[in-house]
Image (tube, helix red, strand yellow):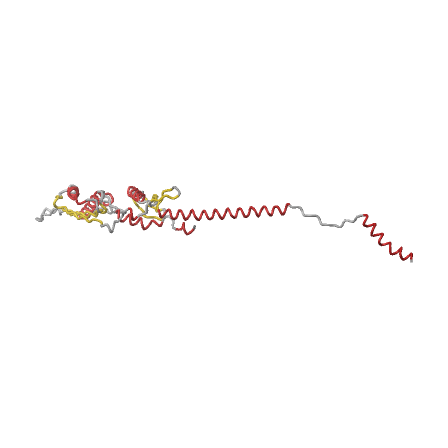
Amino acid sequence: MVLVLAGCGKVDLLSNLPEEEANEIVSLMQQHHIPIAKKPGLELTWTIVLKNSDDFAKAEKILKASGYPKVQYNTIGQVFQKSGLVSSPLEEKARFMYALSESIASTLNKIPGVLTSRVHIVLPENDPYSDADTEASAAIFLTYRVGSNLDESVREIKYLVANSVQGLDYDRVSIALFPVTSEESAITNNNFDTNVSVLGLQMASDAATKFLAIVVVLGVLLLCSMGAAIFFFFEFRKSKRRTTTPKPAQNTPIVVQDDIQNVSDLDEEPDNASREK
């Protein structure tokens, strides 16, 4: 029983997750019948805990194919934190471009089917003395799940990015789509255990095997306990009977008065005979 229960320990799957993403992962694991829970972490984050350590490899495959954990994009407030007294114009521009790219990438990542997204924005130099006519441009990198039909949404995505950056023209937005192949995200119902009924309870087949093993071990222990209890009960009754049964009295010779008289008569006969002689 110890060996059976040894693989049932809890293990942390992911940590430092926002609450929304933690809820999505819990829902995803429950769809694949993997026992899971979440617990609060540091600074308003959450930790995902697997109740059975044997499910770790399976959970990792599901998370990788589903695009979890998601990239944590920095907000404008995080990027524009003041680290010194005075910031140079170049530093302020770099922070602004990075914050804008992170914000747009975070928006694109919420499109159904998108697994990861990155946005790179190039803004022209504001140099009034330069004759070079440069325009703003943007490059978008997206990976998406096969079957999401993201190719039909390319036009809407480019319009979304072009309208998010001042001075950015639609034709200056390029997008690269990379579908995740079936070999990388082959998650089908045949890859995972289906529910089975054990003693009227619905559970996964791997969990059912462990459950039956535990039931068998507990049944054997129960039968052994009952046998030992019955044995000691009868032994106790036998020992109690031995202590309560009275011991028989020792046999003592009983001398009858008539026998004593006959013995005395026999002793006197030789004397009388000798006297007659």
Q: Quadrant of the C terminus?
A: bottom right
Decide if residue 256 is in sight here: yes
Residue farthest to the left? 131
Count of numbered tags = 0
Q: Residue at x 38, y 50 (%)?
A: 7
Residue placed at 23% from the left, 50% from the top? Answer: 182
Rendered residue at 79%/48% (across/down): 256
Tell me if 191 is positioned left or right of 139 in this view: right
Q: Nearer the viewer, residue 81 or 36?
A: 36
Q: State the image coordinates of residue 206 (x, y, percent, origin top left).
A: 36, 48
Q: Residue at x 40, y 47 (%)?
A: 212
Query: Where on the picture, by quarter, is residue 272?
Result: bottom right
Instruction: Give the farthest residue toward the right.
Output: 276
**Could you tell whether 154 is left or right of 52 in the image?**
left
Residue 276, image x and y in percent? 91, 56
Instruction: Determine whether, in the image, residue 176 is placed left or right of residue 48.
Output: left
Percent position (x, y) of residue 85?
Answer: 23, 46
Residue 246 x %, y %: 67, 46
Q: Specify whether residue 47 is in view.
A: no
* Frontmost residue, 87 versus 234: 234
| Residue 73 left/right relative to 246 | left
Of 31 and 233, nearer the camera is: 233
